[in-house]
Every structure is written in structure tokens, then in C-alpha cells.
Image (spheres, coloured by chain):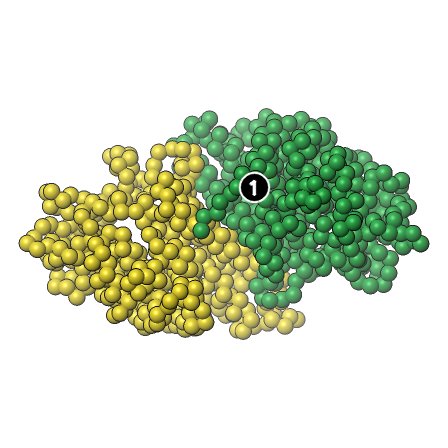
Chain colours: A green, B yellow
């Protein structure tokens, strides 16, 4: 059965593809300055792409997993990925937070918290990461709500975000997985400080602005809590985000293939079978990876319980596609690939950092466990080191 | 067994049939004998007619028909037993060619042979003297037919003739020597006909039960009503027929990979020895990772194969999409080739030294994949995909070379 694509379905993806060329032309400048790609986000907002997965009745595009249209969102992420890895990470973090918010929030919370996105293109940050030796960010109950204390790392978008979803551990005795609580936190709240100097040491994804965010007695109202403690993992929302990573990786692989083709033509290598075969190989990997993203999308759409495992599969194979695609592109571009002007030195740095957001060993082990019908957490696999760290912290 | 609706085909009896075929896969592999009993079983379930038009009692699969049924049957049966899968795929390709090239009367007659009598067909193209263009296309055949009163006389030698020990009839690809009827001819010849000699020469390391040995055809008379179309018609019969040949390989290889994954899971759950300190081998994190990699390989292949099936189906309706469909097929074939070999290797890595016993039969997946993937040079197919993306000349290694390819060869 051939699938038909309507004009309305094509529009966001086409808009993103058009913007991707502009983002590619700006990428080196943003990277060198190590600043958030504000201009790119202004363009994304103008094209209506920042509200893509905000429900239509709240003034958004009505796409995304919560609307039963995950692939339409992921296509946009892929398209942006072909322009600039840093921008696509910033975009998918923003879109993921909207998605997670919709998965956890009451209708009233969703309407309130998404209003600034619709009205003025507010960007969401997502602050969840801890380091192995860092003290967890703690949420304590007060009479009127909550107080947050702690530090979060890799806080993508924090420079320009108007609000963020923040993951914190609720004080208590239960297992940490049942105490993880997601909060909506406006950047207007006193007590939040961006700590600079740490992210600047990283050599890839430099313009994502993934700094440390410190929380010092940040007071939140009761309504800032999204869902109940533990809901985030229980609902498998992290696994769903893996498809966003997979889509970004496929988009970057698209760019690598494009540069590879251009180079083969420019260097008059069209008669070089090995160079031409590398182009064929890259295409195969890209289409196979995207096929897995599509399969995951179908599963989410139909409520198939295998969706989480499929998301892990897509994430794992897309990483393979972008890593191999990078090698192929470097070979086809040749010595010029070592020049910053080629754009490939930046892509090499970006990819080498980006793919390490999760351990692919754990991801593929999750898939392996599922084959054996063994219970597994598709969010992080059974032995999520973060949870492990939190448990050890509790023990101490 | 008759089915009123295609949806009824894939019910419990079908699954049970696949289980029965899978249970005999190791036996046929070790015997290296044509799986006649499996073909009879497929016949009894109505699956042998999967490429026979519905109006003649079949399931209507194949190019020019329902490609979804075609794909599902080949992949499922190959996953159960890859030799039987190849035998069925070749048979189905022959049936599809008859449907597209034959007269209505020929289609009716040969279809009835399949549906009523369980006839198995061969599809003999490869020759020991085969020449190839640099892109992997075939400039022609040495086998030939010449005119005789009431029909034709066929001569030639074929090898890699899958189904030769079990086929009732076979399509015999040959060049017409008739002055006014030049081109590729496709006569259908009874294996029992005078002048046909089948040699049981297939002793290769994989796909051992496919009976893909040599066949000599010497001065065999072919009546006019057994010549499919006019000589030269094959090249124009369907824009997707040639793509579907490559698609069958992708489906078979995907099936081998799937079968290998199923075998590994079953072995881990029921037969493996538990390492020290763990309840089963499946509790070993390294094994879980390698098994996960295997599953990702299988699923990524299935995704590309499905895409190729959809693309060929679209091109069947709209011939302007044929080139894109062929590229999609080659991509699926490349991925399926790599995945099937990789899965075959990892089975042994995961299941361990005990699984190398011949009694276990774990080695057959690698042998089968390694053998079947050698039908084409994958590097050339990668380059063909690359050339197409670059908009360069070439027709991506079709079975029969295009004029452009022939010029390149000269």
C-alpha cells in the first residue's frame, strides 16, 4: 500500500528542510562563538516549528506522540539535524519537554505552561542529568509546594530558555525510581544560577549551551509538579525521546551523505567504485535507521507495547548509521575533511559527543533482554547507572 | 487447502506448517536432499500456489499481483528453512513469469498443475559459461532455441538450477535463433522430457537442500504452446519483474537472519549451559548485548525489505517509479546480505562452543547466508546505489544488461 502525504503533513518538514540550509551556513559561526543559536530559534519560531507538538486546541501544530502523530515531529527533527547537530539537539530538547509535559500534566497545567510557547515562542530547557559523583537535586515538600536544591549538568537550552522541566528526587525512603519527580520551573524563579566555565571545556555541540544550572532554595507552587513521583519512568517517556535522538542522528547522516556526494563529484571520483560504493552504503544505513524510526512511530501510534523496545532499536541503529556515515564522508572528502572550512571537523566533534548521551551498550542490552521476554526498563535498561548512583547515595 | 480470503492464509494452520518445516530444517541441511515433503506440505496448505492468480485457485501473490503475500510467504518459509524458502521463491518467480508472459490459456493450464497437482517449477538462467557486464548485468545466454515444425528445439547447459531435482517443469532462458524472432526466449520444459538430463551436482556448503545443480538440455522439443510469449517479450513484460528477482533474495536473506535470531533465543532458553553464578546463559549481560545487536540487525533489515516491497508494488502500478523501486530493492538486498551473515556469525559467538556440534545445527545459518549472498557481488550493488544517487549512467545491475551496459562492456 502506498502512503500518500498531504500538503499539510509535508509543510512542517519542508519548512524545516528549507531552514536547515541556513542553519548549515551559520553552524561554524555559532560553534566558534559557543553561543546558543538564537537566530535559528527565531527562524524556527517564525515557521511555527516551536509549537509543532503543542495541541491544536492550545494553538499549536497538533503533531507529536501525544497527538498520535509522532513521525511528523520526528521528520522535522531529522530535517533540522541535516542543518546543524547543536540546533537539532536544542530543538528536540525543547520538543521533548513539551511532549513530556503533555504526558504528565493535567489539562490545566498544560494550558498554563504551554501558553508562553504559543504566544511568544518561549524555549523549554530540560534539566535532568547528574554526574556520577554529584549530589542529587532534592525536592522537599513545603506547606505551599516544593523547594528545590542541587545542581543539574548538561542543561541544554539554559541560556535562552524561559522555563524548564527539572527532574528531582523527592525526599523519602522509597526506591529512587519511585521518587523521581518532574517539575515545571520558570526561569523567573529566584535561586537559579547558570554556572559557566564547565560546558566551555567541551569540544562538541558547543552552541547548545549545556551549562550547569544551580538550584538554591528554589520555591515552587504545588502546581509545578507534573504527575506523581515515579510517573516519568513508569510511562516510558524517556524511551520515546530516544526516537528524537535517532531522528537527529539520521538527519546528521543525511548531511554527511550530501557532503560526500558533493565531494565525489567535485574531486572527479565518480569513476572510483570504492568512493561510489561508500555513498551506496551510507544510503542503506540511513534508510534502515529511518525504517526503524518509522516502526517505532507505528508502535507508539497503535499503542503497541513493543514501542519502547523499538525506540531503543532505532536509537542504537541510528547511531551506527551516523558513525559509519561519518567515516564514509571523511574518506570521500579526503584531506580537505581536516579543514574547518569543510564543516566535517565540526561534525566529527559534534557526533563524537552527541552519540554519548546514552550508553549504546545499555541500549542494545535492553533490546536483548526484550528478546528473552525478560522484564526491562526501556527508559534506561535495568541497571541505569543514574538510579544506581542515587541508590548508593541513599545508602550512604 | 482452499482459502476464500488471503487473510485466512496466515492463521494457526499456517503457523503450525511453518513450525513443521522449521523442525526439519536441520535434517534437510545434513541430507542435502530436495525438500519434497516440505513442498508437498506447502501444497496441502495452498501455499505452493502463492503466485498463482486467484481466479485459478492461487493466492495471487507476486509481481503483477499481491506483493505483500509474496513477501510474507518467502520470508516466513525462509525463516523456517532457508532451502525450502529458496525452492519456494524460485518456484514463485517462475509462476509470476508465466502469469506475466504467458497467454491466458497457458496461465490457466500451468496454474492448475500447481494448484491441483502440486507441480513445482524451476527458473533456469545461470550458465557455466556465463558472462557479465562490469555492473553485474548479463549480456545474454549461450542456451538457444531454434524453430522446428510445431514448435522449437532447445539446447543448452544450465547450472545453479534450483529445484532441478524436484521440479515438474522449468523455464529455460535461451536466445532465439529464429531469423524473424530474435531475442530472449522463455520456453517451459518438462523435466521428464526426452533430452533433459538433471545432474545431482549440488554439493555446496550452504542452501544444501535446494538442488541447485546442473541441467543439460539437448535437442529438446518444445511445442508452441509451451513457449511463453514471443522471443524478446521478456524484457518488456513488467518494469518490476527484474527487481522482484533481487527482492526474493532480500526476502530469503531476511528470513535466514530472522530464523537465526529465533534459533538463538530458543537455544538460550532451552538448551544452553548456564555459566557459573547465573541461572541461564541468557542472564549474561554480554549475551544480552549481542542478542540485542542481532535483533536490531533483523529489524532494520525487515524495515528496508518492507520499504522495498512497498516500492515495487508502487512501481507495479506506476512504471515511472521502477528505477527508484529497483534502488530500494538493492538497498534491502545489501542490508539483508550483511545482516544474515552477521547473524550467522553471532549465533555461534552467543551460543558458544557446545553449539558448534553438528547435532545442534547452529552453523547452517552462516553457511546458508554466505552461500546465498554470493549470488551477486554486493560491492557492485553498493556502487550501483551510489551511482544512482549521483545520477550517473547504469541500470543497477539488472539481470539482463541494458544497451548502455552492453556499450560499457564493449
* Residue occupying image coordinates x 47% and y 61%: B258
Q: Quadrant of the N terminus of chain B?
A: bottom left
Query: In the rendered structure, the residue with mark 1 lies on which chain?
Result: A
Q: Residue at 73% x, 38% y: name it.
A: A118
Residue A109 percent coordinates (x, y): 79, 48
Name the element at disc 1: helix
Pinpoint residue B94: horizontal percent, then vertical percent: 28, 57
Q: Which residue is mark 1?
A: A9
Does residue A368 appear to the left or right of A3 in the view shown? right
Residue sticking out furthest to the front: A57
Q: Is residue B254 left or right of residue B201?
A: right
Q: Report crowding for label 1: few under 14, some 14 to 19, many 20 or more residues within 10 A (C-alpha).
A: few
Q: Residue at x 52, y 41 (%)?
A: A6
Residue placed most toward the observer, A4 or B13: A4
**Quadrant (top left/top right/bottom left/bottom right) for the C terminus of chain B:** top left
Q: Vertical placement of B389 versus A305: above or below?
A: above
Amino acid at each position: 500500500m502506498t502512503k500518500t502525504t498531504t500538503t499539510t503533513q509535508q509543510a512542517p518538514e519542508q519548512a524545516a528542510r528549507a531552514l536547515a540550509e541556513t542553519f548549515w551556513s551559520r553552524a561554524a559561526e555559532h560553534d566558534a562563538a559557543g553561543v546558543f543559536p538564537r537566530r535559528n530559534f527565531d527562524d524556527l519560531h517564525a515557521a511555527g516549528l516551536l509549537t509543532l507538538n503543542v495541541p491544536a486546541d492550545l494553538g499549536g501544530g497538533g503533531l507529536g506522540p501525544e497527538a498520535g502523530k509522532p513521525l511528523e515531529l520526528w521528520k522535522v527533527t531529522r530535517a533540522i539535524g541535516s542543518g546543524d547537530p547543536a540546533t537539532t539537539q536544542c530543538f528536540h530538547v525543547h520538543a521533548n519537554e513539551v511532549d513530556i509535559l503533555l504526558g504528565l500534566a493535567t489539562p490545566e497545567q498544560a494550558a498554563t505552561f504551554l501558553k508562553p510557547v504559543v504566544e511568544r515562542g518561549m524555549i523549554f530547557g530540560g534539566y535532568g542529568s547528574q554526574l556520577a559523583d554529584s549530589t542529587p537535586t532534592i525536592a522537599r515538600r513545603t506547606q505551599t509546594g516544593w523547594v528545590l536544591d542541587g545542581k543539574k549538568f548538561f542543561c541544554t537550552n539554559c541560556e535562552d530558555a524561559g522555563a524548564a522541566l527539572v527532574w528531582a528526587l523527592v525526599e523519602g525512603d522509597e526506591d529512587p525510581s519511585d521518587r523521581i519527580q518532574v517539575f515545571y520551573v520558570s526561569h523567573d524563579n529566584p535561586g537559579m544560577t547558570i554556572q559557566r566555565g564547565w560546558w566551555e571545556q567541551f569540544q562538541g555541540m558547543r552552541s547548545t549551551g549545556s551549562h550547569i544550572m544551580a538550584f538554591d532554595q528554589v520555591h515552587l507552587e504545588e502546581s509545578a509538579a507534573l504527575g506523581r513521583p515515579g510517573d516519568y519512568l513508569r510511562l516510558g517517556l524517556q524511551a520515546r525521546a530516544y526516537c528524537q535522538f535517532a531522528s537527529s542522528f539520521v538527519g546528521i547522516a543525511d548531511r554527511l551523505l550530501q557532503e560526500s556526494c558533493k565531494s565525489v563529484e567535485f574531486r572527479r571520483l565518480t569513476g572510483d567504485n570504492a568512493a561510489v560504493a561508500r555513498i551506496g552504503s551510507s544510503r542503506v544505513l540511513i534508510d534502515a535507521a529511518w525504517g526503524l524510526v518509522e516502526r517505532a512511530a507505528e508502535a507508539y501510534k497503535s499503542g503497541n507495547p513493543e514501542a519502547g523496545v523499538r525506540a531503543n532499536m532505532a536509537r542504537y541503529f541510528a547511531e551506527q548509521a551516523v558513525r559509519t556515515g561519518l567515516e564514509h564522508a571523511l574518506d570521500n572528502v579526503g584531506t580537505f575533511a581536516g579543514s574547518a572550512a569543510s564543516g566535517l571537523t565540526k561534525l566529527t566533534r559534534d557526533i563524537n559527543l552527541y552519540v554519548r548521551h546514552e550508553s549504546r551498550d545499555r541500549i542494545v542490552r535492553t533490546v536483548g533482554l526484550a528478546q528473552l521476554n525478560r522484564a526491562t526498563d526501556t527508559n534506561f535498561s535495568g541497571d541505569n547507572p543514574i538510579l544506581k548512583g542515587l541508590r548508593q547515595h541513599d545508602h550512604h | 487447502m482452499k482459502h476464500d480470503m488471503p487473510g485466512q492464509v496466515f492463521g494457526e494452520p499456517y503457523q503450525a506448517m511453518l513450525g513443521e518445516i522449521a523442525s526439519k530444517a536441520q535434517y534437510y541441511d545434513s541430507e542435502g536432499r530436495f525438500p519434497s515433503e516440505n513442498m508437498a506440505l506447502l501444497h496441502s496448505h495452498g501455499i505452493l500456489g502463492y503466485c498463482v492468480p486467484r481466479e485459478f485457485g492461487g493466492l495471487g501473490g507476486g509481481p503483477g499481483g499481491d506483493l505483500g503475500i509474496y513477501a510474507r510467504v518467502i520470508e516466513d518459509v525462509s525463516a523456517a528453512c532457508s532451502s525450502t524458502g529458496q525452492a519456494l521463491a524460485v518456484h514463485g518467480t517462475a509462476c509470476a513469469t508465466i502469469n506475466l508472459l504467458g497467454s491466458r490459456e497457458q496461465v490457466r493450464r500451468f496454474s492448475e498443475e500447481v494448484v491441483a497437482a502440486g507441480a513445482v517449477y524451476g527458473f533456469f538462467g545461470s550458465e557455466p559459461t556465463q558472462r557479465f557486464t562490469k555492473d553485474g548485468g548479463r549480456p545474454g545466454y549461450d542456451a538457444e532455441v531454434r524453430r522446428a515444425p510445431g514448435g522449437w528445439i532447445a539446447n543448452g547447459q544450465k547450472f545453479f538450477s534450483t529445484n532441478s531435482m524436484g521440479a515438474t517443469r522449468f523455464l529455460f532462458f535461451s536466445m532465439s535463433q529464429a531469423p524473424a524472432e530474435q531475442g530472449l526466449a522463455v520456453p517451459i520444459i518438462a523435466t521428464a522430457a526426452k533430452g533433459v538430463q538433471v545432474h545431482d551436482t549440488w554439493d555446496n556448503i550452504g542452501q544444501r537442500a535446494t538442488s541447485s545443480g546442473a541441467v543439460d538440455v539437448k535437442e529438446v522439443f518444445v511445442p508452441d504452446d509451451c513457449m511463453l510469449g514471443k522471443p524478446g517479450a521478456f524484457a518488456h513484460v513488467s518494469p518490476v519483474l527484474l527487481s522482484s528477482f533481487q527482492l526474493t533474495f532480500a526476502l530469503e536473506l531476511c528470513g535466514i537472519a530472522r530464523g537465526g535470531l529465533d534459533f538463538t533465543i530458543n537455544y538460550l532458553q532451552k538448551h544452553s549451559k548456564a555459566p557459573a553464578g547465573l541461572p541461564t546463559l541468557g542472564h549474561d549481560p554480554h549475551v544480552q548485548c549481542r542478542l540485542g545487536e542481532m535483533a536490531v540487525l533483523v529489524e532494520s533489515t525487515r524495515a528496508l525489505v518492507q520499504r522495498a516491497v512497498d516500492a515495487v508494488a508502487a512501481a507495479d502500478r506506476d512504471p515511472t517509479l521502477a528505477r527508484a523501486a529497483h534502488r530500494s530493492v538493492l538497498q534491502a538486498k545489501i542490508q539483508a546480505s550483511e545482516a544474515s551473515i552477521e547473524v550467522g556469525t553471532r549465533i555461534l559467538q552467543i551460543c558458544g562452543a557446545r553449539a558448534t556440534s553438528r547435532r545442534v545445527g547452529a552453523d547452517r545459518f552462516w553457511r546458508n547466508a554466505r552461500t546465498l549472498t554470493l549470488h551477486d557481488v554486493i560491492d557492485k550493488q553498493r556502487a550501483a546505489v551510489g551511482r544512482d544517487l549521483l545520477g550517473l549512467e547504469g541500470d543497477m545491475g539488472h539481470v539482463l544488461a541494458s544497451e548502455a551496459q552492453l556499450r560499457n562492456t564493449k
